[in-house]
Every structure is written in C-alpha cells, then in structure tokens.
C-alpha cells in the first residue's frame, strides 16, 4: 500500500446472496410457508398477535451478510480484483459488480474487506503509475453501485481512498455539462486539442485513463454522482480526512503548475475568436479552482448536516479523529512545475508540515496555500485578489 491511502488493484467475482434473494422483500419470500401458516392460525383464533418474521429487521438489526471467500481473495489479488469490478465498456457486467460489493450489513470484518477489494481493484499500484481503463471503469462502477447506499462504516475509508486516487475526475464533475459516452475514457480520448484544452482537466498525466462520472447508463440503471457518495462516506472521520487531504493536495498541485499570472501554461489562443465562445488563459483555471473550493466547502456542509441529524454524535470527538487521520498541510512549490504526475500521485504527495490553525476552517486552509503561492511567485496583486474572490465565493456556495 502506498502512503496516503493509495494501494494496489485487483479481483474474482463473488456474488451477494442477499441481493439475489429479491431485495428487502427477499426474506418474506424465503419464509412464505411460515408466513402462511401463522396467518391461518391467526385467522382461526381471531387473536391479534404482532407478527415478527425472522430476517424482517432492517439496518444493524438485520441478519448480517457473510462475504464469500472468493470475494475476500480479491483484496490481495489486484489483477483479479480489477477484472471483477470492471463493468466493461458496455456496462454488461455492472449487475455482477453491484452484487459483489454492495452489502449493507456485512458480518464481522466484511465491510473492511470490501473496502480493501475496492482499493485493490481501482487504485494505482505504485507511484508514477497511471490508472488503466479497466481500473477507471471499475471506479465508475463502484460509485454507481454505492451512490445511494448506506455505506458500512468500516468500508468508508476504502471507498474514500479510491475517490482520492481519482481526485481530478471527481472535481471535474462539477464544471461540465454534457453527454458522456462511456464510464471511462482512454488517455487518447482525453488528450488536449490543438488549443491545449480538454474537458477532462488541466495538467493530465500522459497515458492515464479517466473515470467519467457524468456517464449515465439507463439500460444498466447506473449513474455515478460522486457528491451523493461523498456525503455518505464522510460520516466516518477517517474517510473525511482522506477526502479532505486529497482536495487540499490537489489545490496545491494545481497552483504550482499555473503561470505567474495564474493562467494555464498549455493554453493557446483561439484561431477563430469571433466564435460564440472564446476562452482566455485563465478561463479554465478559474473553473477548476472554483470546483476544488466548492468541494472543500461541501465537506464542511456534510459535516454540519450530519451533526444536526445525529450521525455525528460528538462533533469535538469527530474533529479530533479527523485531525489524527489527516496527514498534514499542503503548500504549493515556490516555483512553477512542469511535471504531469498521475492522479494517484497527486493525492499521495508529500505534506509540507503539520496542520496550522483550525483544520475545519476550510477557507483558511485554502487562503493560506493561495497567499503563500501568490507571494512566492510574485503574482500580480489584481490577479491574486481575483483568484481569492473566486475561491471564497465557491467555498461559500459549497458550504
């Protein structure tokens, strides 16, 4: 496992017997003979007796689901795990993937095992390694399968590590509005055009596939809106810390690749500026920085909402646990960098030191990094103020 939550990838298909038994009404069908016999007895005696069937509970009171040995084996076999969680470009294997990983009440250490399987299947194996198309499709399938699920707490850190490894793809979801054609795209499909633009983000690593969380497959019944899943995951302080670290690391990574004017160094002027839309060197950096700030604001919004709803029973204890799991602070380099590391390396970047100030004041954390970058790079005051305002507005909208 890499530091910072990045691990290997891997899996064999093991199936969830509870899912196949017919959803929440499965136990009733399973015990239909018992149900009929009790009902007849009640009719005969005309006695009002509350009827409780085995397996009719819900939540943690419901019978747990054993995780098959074949599924457990995937956690230590990255190549097999990737095959097992890859839904295919046509999503034909998506139902099998969903049965494999979606369990609301796994027995024993089953939830942690499922998190390990997700990590093994989707996360880059080592530093400098870009995601494959199969891994990226697997990441899409996991988000789609878990989007509206009650994620078991012990599984949350593993799923969070997966999202952290795709931090560029997760953040990009906010700024696009288009029809996606597949659950993931190859490096060739996401490559910049002649103007240096690609809708898959700035500073992309060569040779890396990207999950496309905007894709929706009506036939398979799959959508993958990451914000819904993030909102569920961050009830767990370790998962919160993993996602918060990844966003702050991405912010520092992004700033240190901008020009001294805060623009995209790869941008080229439009050949036909008279067209209805014409970008500048700062158009897409502004959008990207807005997305990052909004996602950090959203983490704080989820924290507040879960506290109001009682999912976080003790906010001070939760915040202390987040701080324990947080790796540290992230500051941009004092000079412009030209390297294009894969997404997993962004989330796995070395920290600059311990966290300073209130960790849960996301705006303070963003401004501290931005101001340090602007001072070191001698960014024009007007541009630095504009960027600060963009980040401030987006953070507040996220909150």
Image (tube, rainbow, N blue to C red):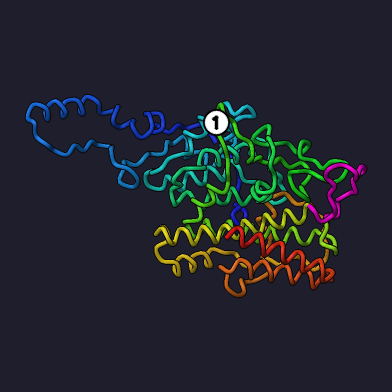
Kindly indicate the quadrant of the structure image that contains residue 385: bottom right
Residue at 67% in and 60% down: 249
Q: Which residue is mark 1?
A: 94
For numbered disc 1, what is the local secondary structure? helix
Is residue 166 at all visible to an observer of this figure?
no
Kindly indicate the quadrant of the structure image that contains residue 346: bottom right
Percent across and percent down for residue 272 are: 92, 42
Q: Relative to 366, does residue 263 appear above or below in the rendering? A: above
Indicate yes or no whether the magenta region holds residue 237.
Answer: no
Left or right: 319 as drawn, with respect to 258 = left
- Secondary structure that dominates the magenta span: loop
Percent across and percent down for residue 113 are: 47, 45
Left or right: 43 as drawn, with respect to 199 = left
Residues rendered magenta in the picture: 264-283
Viewer-proximal residue among 52 and 187: 52
Is residue 1 at all visible to an observer of this figure?
yes
Left or right: 91 as drawn, with respect to 31 = right
Disc 1: CA contacts within 10 A as few (<14), some (14-19) or many (>=20) = many
Q: Relative to 382, does residue 258 appear above or below in the rendering? A: above
Percent across and percent down for residue 98 are: 50, 34
Q: Which residue is situated farthest in the bottom direction here?
A: 357
Percent across and percent down for residue 2 are: 62, 54
């Amino acid at each position: 496992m890499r530091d910072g939550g990045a691990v290997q990838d891997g899996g064999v298909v093991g199936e969830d017997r509870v899912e196949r038994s017919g959803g929440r009404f499965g136990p009733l069908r399973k015990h239909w003979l018992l149900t009929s016999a009790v009902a007849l007895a009640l009719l005969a005696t005309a006695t009002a007796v509350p009827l409780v069937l085995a397996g009719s509970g819900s939540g943690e009171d419901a019978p747990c689901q054993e995780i098959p040995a074949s599924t457990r084996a995937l956690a230590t076999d990255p190549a097999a795990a990737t095959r097992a969680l890859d839904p295919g470009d046509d999503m034909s294997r998506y139902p099998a993937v969903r049965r494999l990983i979606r369990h609301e009440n796994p027995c024993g250490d089953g939830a942690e095992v499922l998190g390990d399987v997700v990590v093994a299947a989707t996360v880059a194996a080592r530093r400098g390694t870009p995601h494959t198309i199969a891994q990226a499709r697997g990441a899409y399938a996991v988000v789609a399968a878990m989007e509206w699920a009650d994620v078991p707490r012990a599984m949350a850190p593993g799923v969070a590590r997966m999202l952290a490894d795709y931090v560029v793809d997760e953040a990009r979801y906010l700024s696009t509005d288009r029809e996606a054609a597949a659950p993931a795209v190859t490096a060739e499909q996401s490559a910049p055009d002649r103007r240096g633009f690609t809708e898959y983000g700035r500073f992309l690593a060569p040779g890396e596939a990207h999950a496309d969380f905007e894709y929706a497959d009506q036939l398979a019944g799959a959508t993958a809106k990451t914000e819904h899943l993030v909102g569920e995951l961050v009830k767990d302080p370790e998962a919160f810390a993993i996602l918060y670290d990844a966003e702050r690391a991405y912010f520092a990574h992004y700033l240190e690749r901008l020009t001294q004017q805060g623009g995209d160094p790869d941008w080229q002027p439009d050949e036909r500026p008279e067209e209805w839309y014409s970008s500048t060197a700062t158009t897409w950096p502004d959008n990207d920085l807005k997305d990052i700030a909004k996602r950090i604001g959203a983490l704080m919004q989820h924290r507040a909402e879960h506290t109001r709803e009682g999912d976080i029973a003790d906010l001070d204890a939760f915040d202390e646990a987040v701080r324990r799991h947080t790796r540290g602070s992230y500051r941009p380099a004092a000079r412009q960098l030209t390297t294009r590391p894969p997404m997993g390396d962004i989330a796995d970047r070395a920290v600059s030191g311990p966290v300073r100030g209130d960790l849960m004041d996301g705006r303070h954390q963003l401004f501290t990094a931005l101001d340090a970058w602007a001072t070191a790079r001698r960014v024009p005051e007007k541009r630095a103020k504009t960027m600060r305002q963009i980040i401030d507005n987006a953070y507040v909208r996220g909150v």
